[in-house]
Structure formats: structure tokens, C-alpha cells
Image: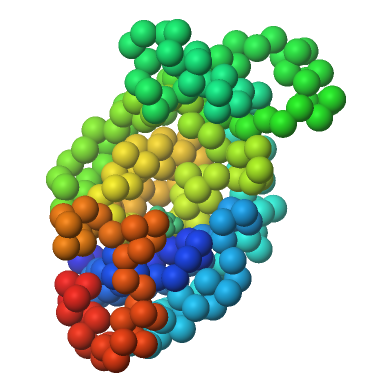
Amino acid sequence: MPAGSVTRFAPSPTGLLHLGHAHAALFARRTGARCLLRIEDIDAGRCRPEFAAALIEDLAWLGLEWDGTPRVQSRHFIDYRRTLDALAGRGLLYPCFCTRGDIASAIAAQHGVPAHSYPGTCRGMPRGEAEARIARGDAHALRLDVARALAATGPLAFTDLIQGPRRCAPEAQGDVVLARKDTPVSYHLCVTHDDALQGVTLVTRGEDLLEATDIHRLLQALMGWPEPLYAHHALILGPDGKRLAKRDRAPTLRALRTAGHRPDEVRAMAGF
Ligand code: GLU
């Protein structure tokens, strides 16, 4: 670990923390780097202040302390908007009016398009038409024109301390959404913005986010932000061998605590 490294734990307060979060938090803290806490609460429909308060308390109970004051993303929409405007000013974003249904039928009609990626329906929309639709209040997202972005940056890669070297293929995910219809910004934009702003030099997170990093490297290269080191760790699995998730009612730290487990026992259950 290079001296002066900075990492972070960046949970989204959409529910109570479970053992998977405890693993990620302990992993970040145990790197030995300066470790920040960031509350990623941009999705007002899913995040709740009481979950943010609960996670801070649960992490403290677990014995985790953080460096500096936690950053709360929902207080910084103006900063993220500036980044969006900078990308839009370079012609790298376009409005997309498609519904989920529109996208599913366009994918079904176009063989060879990966089912999870966007087939580019609105990419070629004449500017006048897009402006008229925005003026009349049609709901739209803003997508990154990934081919154009890659033409500006050239090929990208990153070093992962666990997974090894990786060549980025952001195009495999289609033109990702950077501003959603219901939320003014997206995870990809906020996370890269904040990692750069906060001087994060080591990004630790679960390996389920490995592909997201291909997009993050693209945004970093476009914005001239530094490239951190990455460590995408394995996810801890439930007794059924599947990853723990809130929707599967994974045991929350709070439930384990109420059941009488001590912090050191819960840390051990989380792999530390
Ligand atoms: N907020 C994201 C999550 O809870 C993690 C962000 C990150 O580590 O980059 O899944």
C-alpha cells in the first residue's frame, strides 16, 4: 500500500446494513489507508435518512471509525450537474426518451445487441426534435455517447490489486445513463466525481462492480481526473452459496446485534 493512500466505504442507505456491507467496510478500513465514509444517497426514491443514520450507528457498533466528515452525496447535486454540463458541452451526452418497454422491443428487433445494453435508439435523433421534446416536458435521461467518448480518450485499462490488469470495454454496456429521468445524476457520475474530489487513490468494492469500473475509467479520462488503484474483492456468500442481498433478507447487523452477538463475532462472520 503506497504511503498516503486514501480509500473509502460508500454505502447507499436503501436499507439496513448486512454482513456483505460489513465485509466491504472492514475490507476498506483494514487496507491501512486513510478511510473515508461516503453516503451515496442520490436516489431519493430508494434512500432514506433513517437508513443513513442507522448505518453510521451500526458501523460504529462494529468498531469502525472513519477519517474526516462523511460526505453525503444528496447535498452536492450542483457539483454533479457541473460535470454533466461539461460533458454535454463537448457533445458527449444525448437525451434519451425511451421507456424500458421501448428499449426491450428495440433490443428484441436488433439481433446481436447484448440484452442489458442500450441499442442507441435516440443517439441519432435530430437536435431540433430532441430540443422540441425537452421543451414540451417529455421525460428523458442523458446518455453518454460511449463510442464518441472512447474516440476522445483512446483505449483504457486499470490495475486491480486482486483481479489483475484489466482492459476496459465500456462499449459492452451500451451508452450508459449519466442522468436519470427520476434522479438528476447517476451512480457512475457521482462516484467518479467524488473519488477525484476526495483524493481517493484506492477504490475498494465488491467484484460485482468490476464492469462499472470500465465506465468510471472512461469518465476519469474524459474529465482529466486521476486514475486510482482498484481492489474488487470477492463477495461473501450466504449458506446457499448465493451473494447476500437485502432482498433475500440477509441477516442485518442490527438483527445480529439484537440476537446478542458481539461486534467481534459479527466481524468474524463478515470474514475479519
Ligand atoms: N454505493 C455503491 C453501493 O452501495 C458502492 C459504490 C462504490 O463502492 O463505488 O453499491
Residue 19 point in image, percent of width and height: 29, 70
Residue 57 point in image, percent of width and height: 46, 83
Q: Which of the 4 image quadrants contains residue 125? A: top right
Q: Is residue 267 above or below residue 94?
A: below
Most foreground residue, 121 or 197: 121
Q: Is residue 251 above or below residue 256?
A: above
Quarter of the image containing the C terminus? bottom left
Quarter of the image containing the N terminus? bottom left
Residue 82 point in image, percent of width and height: 66, 45
Q: Name the image colouring.
A: rainbow
**Number of marks in the rendered image:** 0
Q: What residue do we see at 21% from left, 49% from top? A: 160
Q: Which of the 4 image quadrants contains residue 21? A: bottom left
Q: Is residue 233 visible?
A: no
- The quadrant where ligand 1 appears is bottom left
Q: Is residue 100 above or below residue 52?
A: above
Q: Is residue 83 above or below residue 128?
A: below
Residue 107 point in image, percent of width and height: 44, 16
Most foreground residue, 48 or 56: 48
Left or right: where 77 falls relative to 116: right
Q: What residue do we see at 33% from left, 53% from top? A: 228
Left or right: where 107 falls relative to 270: right
Most foreground residue, 220 or 236: 236
Q: What residue do we see at 36% from left, 80% from top? A: 255
Q: Is residue 14 visible?
A: yes
Q: What residue do we see at 50% from left, 48% from top? A: 187
